[in-house]
Amino acid sequence: MAFDRPQVPPDEKAPVGAAPVPFVVTIDGVGHVPAFSDERVLVSLERAQSLGRLPELRIKLPVGCRRGGCGICRARVLKGNYRSEAMSQEHVSREDRDLGIVLCCSIFALSDITLRLEPAPKARPRTVVAADS
Ligand code: FES
């Protein structure tokens, strides 16, 4: 499985020991939750849902590997800044990233953000590499 490891500009990395910064993550048309700069957006959403703070979200948040590998927590960021960790290229292509597609378990808010949960794309054909002969 290929992972895209984004480079985070040094000025976007939180200094070691810095206090987490509070932000608001809004799910478009659903509601908003508090989030912190040092936690994965998926964690913020899960916490809010478990506390009953996303009653308009009629599905249980899709959660799988929690580390950018399974693609189940796919979303599109509509507004705001974030930094990301590795995401599977199988589930988020470079073109997807340019369109704001992310995996909620692999992003951290750098401002208030608005996102929309996205269904996982239909399975993409896997690249087959011929064996050396
Ligand atoms: S939970 Fe697997 S990619 Fe987010």
Image (cartoon, grey):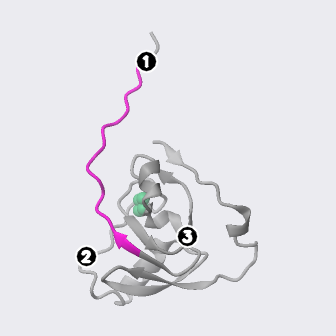
Which dot, 3 or 1, sits closer to the camera?
3
Q: Give x and y (percent) for residue 51.
A: 38, 89
Q: Give x and y (percent) for residue 5.
A: 58, 51
Q: Which residues are magenta?
A: 115-131
Which amino acid, by three-letter code, is at mark 3?
A: Tyr
User: Do tag 1 and tag 2 residues touch (Cβ < 8 Å)?
Assistant: no
Which amino acid, by three-letter code, is at mark 1?
A: Ala
User: Do tag 3 and tag 1 residues touch (Cβ < 8 Å)?
Assistant: no
Estimate how packed mark 3 is, as few (under 14), some (14 to 19) or many (20 or more) residues with alpha carbons within 10 Å: some
Nearer to us in this view, 100 or 25 = 100
In the image, taking residue 107 as reference, residue 11 lies left or right, namely right
Nearer to us in this view, 51 or 89 = 89
Considering the numbered disc 1 on the image, is that residue within a helix, a strand or a loop? loop
Considering the numbered disc 2 on the image, is that residue within a helix, a strand or a loop? loop
Residue 33 is covered by the magenta coloring: no
In primary-sequence order, the first of circles 2 and 3 is: 2
In primary-sequence order, the first of circles 3 and 1 is: 3
Disc 2 to disc 3, C-alpha distance: 24 Å
Q: Give x and y (percent) for residue 120.
A: 30, 57
Q: For residue 93, say whether it is visible.
A: no
User: Disc 1 designates what residue?
Assistant: 131
In primary-sequence order, the first of circles 1 and 2 is: 2
Residue 123 is covered by the magenta coloring: yes
In the image, taking residue 25 as reference, residue 108 lies left or right, namely right
Furthest residue to the top?
A: 133
Q: Give x and y (percent) for residue 1.
A: 45, 42
Q: Which mark is residue 82?
A: 3
